[in-house]
């Protein structure tokens, strides 16, 4: 940081996004060997926050693209500047990563590779920080990686019960862990059958497996023609409740 600058306008104040990744990556270096150095004055994370703010302020909206600044000149006071000389190489590398990450997150383009320069301004006081952002054309625009997007969720098919009745088949999805079969109107699967009990049987579905259980019904519950108290269901199995046939179809 041997270059000096005489004056620079103060940047506007705006809200900036969280930069925890930057703090984490650079934190070990700052908190270790140089922890005493950064107890006062400008902190490294302040520079990153101001840089992100400058990108937002200096972006240019084109017809089909938004171009963000890629060149940044950072001015510090003569008291703060020397503290950063010891970590300048690492700090510049991390700030370039911040530029690329921020551009990717916002969907902005860069007209050239990210560039960061530090200056010492003898007119500034300790704790002062100024960032000047500009677009500097490179040989070709930088390809900013697009943020990863999660694949669209695949709709899951639900198992269902197919109640076979005189006038057709009624399909009922197994959309709850526990579903009751019986004559009562509050049952999940209501059967209009005098041979069925008011609460005749239940279907429990857990971890992708459905099980039929008789609830102490008068006439019992059959699975594929055989009396059962409780049994797991497979695709195509037929449950008999009174005189009603109910077919189980897996997802």
Image (cartoon, grey):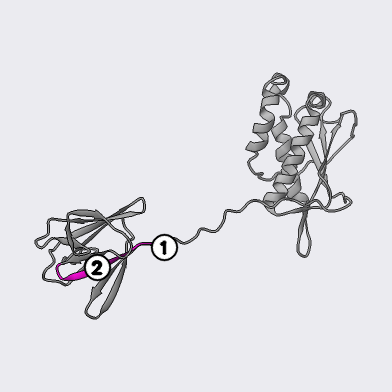
* Residue hosting label 2: 246
Residue 248 is one of the magenta-drawn residues: yes
Say which residue appears at 24% left-offset and 54% top-offset: 231
Q: Earlier in the sequence, mark 1 or mark 2?
A: 1
Q: Is residue 80 left or right of residue 39?
A: right
Q: Nearer the viewer, residue 224 or 6?
A: 224
Query: Looking at the rendering, which quadrant does residue 43 occupy?
Result: top right
Callout 1: 10 Å neighbours few (<14), some, many (20+)? few
Q: Is residue 209 above or below residue 127?
A: below
Say which residue appears at 90% left-offset and 31% top-offset: 4
Q: Nearer the viewer, residue 197 or 98?
A: 197
Screen quadrant of the N terminus: top right
* Distance Cα–Cα, label 1 vs label 2: 19 Å
Mark identifier at residue 157: 1
Residue 3 is one of the magenta-drawn residues: no
Marks 2 and 1: in contact by CB < 8 Å?
Answer: no
Query: Looking at the rendering, which quadrant does residue 119 occupy?
Result: top right
Mark 1, secondary structure of its residue? loop
Measuring from the top left, give residue 173's x and y in whole percent: 33, 65
Q: Is residue 165 above or below residue 234?
A: below
Q: Is residue 134 above or below residue 156?
A: above
Give the main secondary structure of the magenta stretch: strand
Measuring from the top left, give residue 46's x and y in whole percent: 71, 35
Measuring from the top left, give residue 159's x and y in whole percent: 35, 62
Give the magenta range. 242-251
Mark 2, secondary structure of its residue? strand
Q: Of the residues tagged 1 and 2, which is closer to the observer?
A: 2
Mark identifier at residue 187: none
Query: Looking at the rendering, which quadrant does residue 47 occupy?
Result: top right
């Amino acid at each position: 940081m041997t270059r000096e600058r005489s004056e620079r306008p103060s940047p506007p104040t705006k809200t900036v996004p969280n930069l925890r990744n930057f703090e984490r990556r650079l934190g070990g270096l700052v908190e270790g060997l140089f922890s005493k150095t950064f107890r006062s004055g400008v902190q490294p994370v302040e520079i990153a926050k101001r840089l992100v703010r400058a990108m937002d302020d200096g972006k240019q909206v084109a017809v089909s693209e938004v171009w963000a600044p890629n060149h940044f000149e950072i001015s510090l006071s003569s008291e703060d500047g020397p503290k950063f000389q010891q970590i300048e190489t690492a700090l510049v590398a991390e700030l370039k990563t911040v530029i690329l990450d921020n551009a990717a997150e916002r969907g902005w383009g860069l007209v050239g590779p990210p560039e960061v320069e530090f200056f010492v301004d003898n007119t500034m006081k300790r704790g002062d920080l100024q960032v000047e952002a500009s677009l500097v054309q490179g040989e070709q625009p930088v390809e900013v990686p697009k943020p990863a997007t999660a694949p669209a969720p695949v709709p899951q098919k639900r198992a269902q019960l197919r109640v076979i009745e005189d006038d057709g088949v009624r399909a009922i999805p197994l959309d709850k862990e526990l579903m009751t079969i019986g004559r009562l109107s509050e049952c999940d699967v209501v059967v209009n059958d005098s041979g069925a009990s008011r609460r005749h049987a239940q279907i429990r579905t857990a971890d992708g497996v459905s099980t039929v259980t008789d609830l102490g019904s008068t006439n019992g519950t059959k699975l594929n023609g055989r009396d059962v108290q409780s049994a797991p269901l497979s695709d195509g199995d037929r449950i008999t409740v009174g005189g009603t046939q109910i077919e189980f179809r897996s997802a």
